[in-house]
Image (cartoon, grey):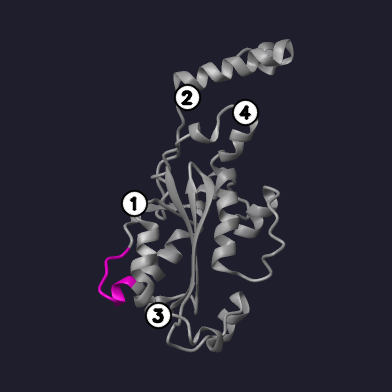
Amino acid sequence: MREIVLDTETTGLDPASGDRVVEIGCVELENRIATGRTYHVYLDPERDMPDEAFRVHGLSRAFLADKPKFATIVDEFLAFLADSPLVIHNASFDAKFLDAELVKIGREGLPRGRLVDTLTLAGRLHPGQRNSLDALCARYGIDASRRTRHGALLDAELLAEVYAELTGGKQTSLGLADAGDARALDLSGVAAAGGAVVALTPSDADLARHSAFVDALGSSALWRRYGER
């Protein structure tokens, strides 16, 4: 299962008022494990850089002046995305900016059914708690010390680790499954507008592996002491 973790940096908060995308970062996942393939580009926004935005990401108008325009990279960008689900933190924000860039050059926007919003997912798992990227990294013990400022590729890399925690992807390290047999969770309902709570149904193979795992623990296993439920 191929997925793309995606993040953007922009000149502001609202593309309708003329704000533009200035950086795109993507990380490719296979079965929720990073493959090492990434896509990263800085973009010329063809406008000034407000001080508020510069303080967030540190990308100046002078630095971006010789970078490519969105129209010149759109084909390679969309080719990297292909038809994979897009994992984004606060997906509606990035999607509205990318849609604005795409529509500006006569392309179609991103289908909302492809979006997996990790902010929505985190809110269901940790209701009433702070679920920013920094807060989730701290909660899951992910080293975010390099994140002195926002950066699209770095944030996508960190989000890929957070996503693995949110979806239980790191369970593979316990020996209950291998990388070629990772669980395929259906997160189509965790879109920007919300959706159904994800339900997991173990296969016969999953149950057999679990039984073997419990047998290996012997009489000390909690399942033996309290009964399997």
Labels 3 and 2: the sequence-earlier one: 3
Q: Secondary structure at mark 1?
A: helix
Residue segment shown in magenta:
102-109
For the point 49% across and 34% down, the residue is: 180
Whether residue 173 is situated above or below residue 44 in the rendered picture: above
How crowded pointer 1 is (Cα within 10 Å; few <14, some 14-19, many 20+) is rated as some
Magenta-drawn stretch contains 57: no
Which residue is at the far left? 106
Residue in the image at 57% along x and 19% along y: 210
Location of mark 4 (residue)? 175
Q: According to the image, label 2 marks what residue?
A: 202
> Residue at (39%, 68%) from the top-left corner?
98
Q: Residue 59's image quarter?
A: bottom right
Q: Position of residue 79 (x, y in %)?
A: 35, 61
The disc, 3 or 1, on the residue closer to the chain's N-terminal end is 3
Q: Which residue shows up at 49% across the image and 31% down it? A: 181
3 and 1 marks in contact (CB < 8 Å): no
Res 27 seen here: yes
Q: Tell me the crowding category of disc 4: few under 14, some 14 to 19, or many 20 or more residues within 10 angstroms, Cα based.
A: few
Q: What's the distance in space between the residues labelled 4 and 2, CA to CA?
A: 16 Å
Q: CA distance from mark 4 to mark 3?
A: 46 Å
Q: Amino acid at mark 2?
A: Pro
The image quadrant where one finds the N terminus is top left
Q: Which mark is residue 113?
A: 1
Q: CA distance from mark 3 to mark 2?
A: 47 Å
